[in-house]
Image (cartoon, coloured by chain):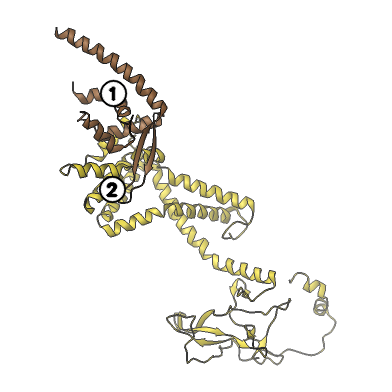
Chain colours: A brown, B yellow
């Protein structure tokens, strides 16, 4: 098992979590995820996830023109996104606890 | 960041978009907006990094966004289309390598919406030629025509905004080529329509001083008029007026023409400008025939040469048959001529 496989299932909640407090553009979100320890996260996966969360109503987006180069597309969380995040936090906490216990039990 | 890196990023982004081309255009736009900025930043942060494979990248993007996998093109037409568009792509990539041609490409790309409008207009012109009543005008005159034009432009924008499957791109290319052709055809018919509209306007308003003058014969502009008297001898300084008393002016003031032509090619050898005639009131008249011409500067054909003198234009006939002035019998021809109601009614 490798971490990239695990990551796929939780990328949504991870992305929502890093834009919870501050809006971010594509690469900015990648950088936050990597800074949090998810080194293996693929850029295209993050951008695709942002797009899907946006289509699902969890994120808003706006374009900020840049004078020196191409413009940036920022994403921000919506109330619906916050709701999704809080639900998934609970689900994750339960799941992680279950897995912790299971793996501890298996090790014992 | 240097130019070649920017070019590489642009090329990569273009390849990614091409790999997503089976998706609706707005979806591709949403998915890849800001891609260049993100890539530039990622590359700036890690200079040793190389750009990934565009197709793999597009697949990852697609998968994460929950969009369907790309459909491989099928059939022979699709294969031809794929080859054709990859040839275009290669050509574009070659042009992109130089900053100058790359900038030109960007400029051309920025004109795309205008092209959509022109293409819609060309479709309207085609429709008018095929199903309309005779010649097409530049723009419609009635609500129905405007609605048709709006529909055509809307359709053209729809075709332009969407990214079509490869097998549909070849017919669109042919359609575009046809639209370009139609645009030239329609614009070629334009000057005569325009002149007619001008002549119509000036006769309708009864005015001439605004410069909107002109006389047409069978749709062609009359540039000069030669009058002959009852003996068939050429007359000079004949003042002509229309039925409403408007001066009959063939050319607007400052209208340039041609003084002498190349004998073989009929191209203009010496440019010239028409000159007006001064009336006793001091006014300049343009309805005194035949008009003379003064040689003008080859650089600016509307500027007469300082030393040049007005020259008479060669008359089409030295002499024409004299008019028979014998008293006419009250025959059928005389009947029509003496019936002003029948003659003048529809000649306005």
Label 1 Cα crowd, 10 Å radius (few <14 / some 14-19 / many 20+)? few
With A38 as the anchor, is A80 left or right in this view? right
Residue B206, quarter of picture:
bottom right
Residue A5 visible in rendering = yes
Is B152 located above or below residue B59 in the figure? below
On the image, the x and y values in percent for residue B253 come to: 57, 80
On the image, the x and y values in percent for residue B149 come to: 56, 51
The quarter in which the N terminus of chain A is drawn is: top left
With B197 as the anchor, is A62 left or right in this view? left
Is B213 located above or below residue B318 in the figure? above
Residue on which disc 2 sits: B10
Asked if badge 2 and badge 1 are on a common chain, one would say no
> Which element type, helix, strand or loop, lies under badge 2?
helix
Residue on which disc 1 sits: A10
How many tags in the picture?
Answer: 2
Q: Are marks 2 and 1 in contact (CB under 8 Å)?
A: no
Label 2 Cα crowd, 10 Å radius (few <14 / some 14-19 / many 20+)? some
Name the mark on residue B93: none
Q: Relative to the observer, which residue lies in front, B242 or B39?
A: B39
Q: Residue at x 24, y 22 (%)?
A: A6
Q: Relative to the observer, which residue lies in front, B19 or B82?
A: B19
Q: Relative to the observer, which residue lies in front, B151 or A58?
A: A58
With A89 as the anchor, is A107 left or right in this view? left
Is B52 located above or below residue B123 in the figure? above
Q: Residue at x 28, y 41 (%)?
A: B38
> Which element type, helix, strand or loop, lies under badge 1?
helix
Residue B137, quarter of picture:
bottom right
On the image, the x and y values in percent for residue B221 come to: 58, 75
**Outermost residue toward the right in this view:** B330
């Amino acid at each position: 098992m490798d971490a990239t496989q695990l990551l796929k299932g939780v990328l949504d909640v991870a992305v929502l979590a890093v834009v919870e407090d501050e809006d971010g553009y594509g690469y900015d979100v990648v950088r936050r995820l990597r800074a949090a320890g998810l080194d293996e996260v693929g850029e295209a996966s993050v951008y695709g996830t942002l797009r899907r969360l946006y289509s699902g109503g969890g994120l808003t987006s706006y374009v900020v023109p840049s004078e020196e180069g191409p413009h940036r597309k920022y994403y921000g969380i919506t109330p619906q996104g916050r709701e999704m995040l809080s639900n998934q936090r609970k689900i994750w906490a339960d799941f992680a606890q279950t897995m912790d216990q299971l793996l501890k039990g298996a090790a014992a | 960041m240097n130019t070649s890196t920017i070019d590489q990023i642009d090329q990569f982004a273009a390849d990614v978009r091409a790999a997503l081309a089976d998706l609706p255009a707005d979806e591709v736009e949403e998915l890849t907006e800001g891609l260049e900025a993100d890539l530039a930043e990622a590359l700036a942060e890690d200079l040793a990094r190389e750009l990934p494979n565009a197709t793999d990248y597009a697949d990852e993007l697609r998968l994460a966004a929950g969009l369907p996998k790309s459909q491989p093109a099928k059939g022979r037409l699709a294969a031809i289309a794929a080859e054709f568009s990859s040839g275009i792509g290669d050509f574009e990539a070659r042009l992109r390598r130089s900053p100058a041609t790359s900038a030109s490409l960007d400029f051309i790309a920025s004109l795309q919406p205008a092209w959509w409008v022109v293409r819609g207009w060309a479709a309207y012109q085609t429709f008018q030629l095929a199903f309309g009543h005779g010649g097409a005008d530049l723009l419609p005159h009635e609500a129905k025509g405007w609605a048709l034009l709006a529909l055509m432009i809307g359709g053209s924008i729809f075709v332009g905004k969407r990214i079509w499957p490869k097998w549909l791109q070849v017919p669109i290319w042919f359609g575009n080529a046809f639209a370009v052709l139609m645009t030239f055809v329609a614009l070629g018919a334009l000057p005569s329509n325009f002149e007619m509209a001008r002549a119509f306007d000036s006769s309708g308003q009864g005015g001439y001083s605004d410069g909107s003058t002109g006389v047409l014969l069978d749709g062609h502009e009359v540039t000069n008029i030669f009058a002959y008297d009852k003996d068939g001898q050429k007359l000079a300084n004949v003042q002509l007026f229309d039925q409403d008393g408007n001066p009959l002016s063939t050319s607007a003031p400052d209208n340039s023409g041609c003084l002498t032509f190349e004998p073989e090619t009929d191209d203009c050898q010496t440019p010239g400008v028409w000159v007006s005639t001064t009336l006793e009131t001091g006014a300049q008249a343009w309805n005194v025939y035949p008009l003379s011409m003064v040689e003008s500067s080859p650089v600016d054909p509307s500027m007469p040469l300082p030393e040049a003198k007005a020259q008479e234009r060669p008359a089409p006939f030295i002499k024409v048959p004299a008019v028979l002035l014998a008293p006419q019998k009250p025959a059928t021809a005389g009947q029509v001529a003496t019936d002003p109601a029948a003659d003048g009614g529809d000649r306005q």
